[in-house]
Image (cartoon, rainbow, N blue to C red):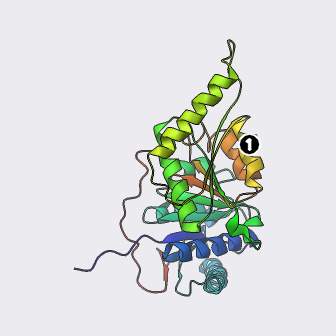
Amino acid sequence: MTAAAAPPIVTGVDGSAESLDAVRWAARTACLRDAALEIVHALDVPALLTGGVVPPPEEMVDALRARGRRALRIARELAAAQGVPGATTRLDPDRAAQALIEASRAAALLVVGSAGHGRLTSLLAGSVAAAVGTHARCDTVVVRGDSWDEPGAGERPVVTGIDGSEAGTRVLAAALAEARVRRAPLVVLHAWTDAPPPRPDPRCVADAGRRLLGERLHDHDLGDLAVEQVVVHAHPRRELIERSGSAQLVVLGDRGRGGFPGLLLGSTGQALLHHAACPVLLVRTASGGKRDGSPIRQDGPDRERGIR
């Protein structure tokens, strides 16, 4: 009996420069992980339904298919130039959010750009952030900035923030894994702001933060991994945005108390997704959000789902 293929890294492309950046980042990460790469283009056929029910003219759908295949061909060539010659591609008739959420069910990682044509690349920084954040079944990377593509970027650290939550344990594990696979140093940050009166002694808060980091890191075999522990009296949002300028990746929880409270659906997460200077990895921390591990059905190098 043949073992199931390992889950691929999935990235979305809409033809924009930002989505092509996501393809390049995803391809390089696929090389680091020795993982397969799948590239998805969403046709957004439901948006063409007249009155929500009447199908669009076939020639209009044909034009969408042609444009989508062109975008996928360019993306596949770009992935090959990054060292992934065998990337699979897929046209999906659905809306971008639904297409990627479905693809995430059998993905190891979902990668999107930070802006673009309002399709795949703007998913996590736009109006459908809540839908993807709630329903994606795997970790998600939003590719931001261009410093990750500069010479020597691989020497920059991976940065993460943790608190005392159970979800923070998952975030730290993911950050450690990313630092190892990238052979990069890791910065583990614990930041706090002033509490309402009566305020605790800042020295006591700092000592508690250092104990927390020490205890969380003690649970892991760090080997020769260089880890910098940072405890700072500052707003987590500002501190992470500032540190993203010298990082190659920031690792956060997708929502709730995973790294810092309310990251994705609150103001801190939205700020990072809009202003971070490097890619942001959102670690899936919800207990019900783990992918089911089923392999993607693949009939060949390129396939179309539900398109007639």
237 or 256: which is nearer to us? Answer: 237
Callout 1 crowding tier (Cα within 10 Å): few <14, some 14–19, many ≥20: some
Q: What secondary structure is found at the residue carrying circle 1?
A: helix
Determine which residue is flagged by label 1.
239
Q: In this view, does 294 lie above or below 171?
A: below
The single residue placed furthest to the left in the displayed view is: 1
Q: Quadrant of residue 70?
A: bottom right
Q: Residue at x 47, y 44 (%)?
A: 218
At label 1, which amino acid type do we have?
Answer: Glu
124 or 61: which is nearer to us? Answer: 124
Q: In this view, does 119 lie above or below 201?
A: below
Q: Let me know if residue 224 appears in the view.
A: yes
Residue 115 picture location, percent across and down: 73, 61
Q: Quadrant of residue 185?
A: bottom right
Residue 159 picture location, percent across and down: 65, 52
Residue 32 picture location, percent across and down: 55, 73
Residue 270 picture location, percent across and down: 69, 45
Q: In this view, does 202 lie above or below 180?
A: above
Give the left or right position of residue 124, taking residue 35 as reference. right
Q: Residue at x 64, y 80 (%)?
A: 75
Give the left or right position of residue 299, taking residue 27 as reference. left
The single residue placed furthest to the top in the displayed view is: 198
Q: Let me know if residue 285 appears in the view.
A: no
Q: Quadrant of the N terminus?
A: bottom left
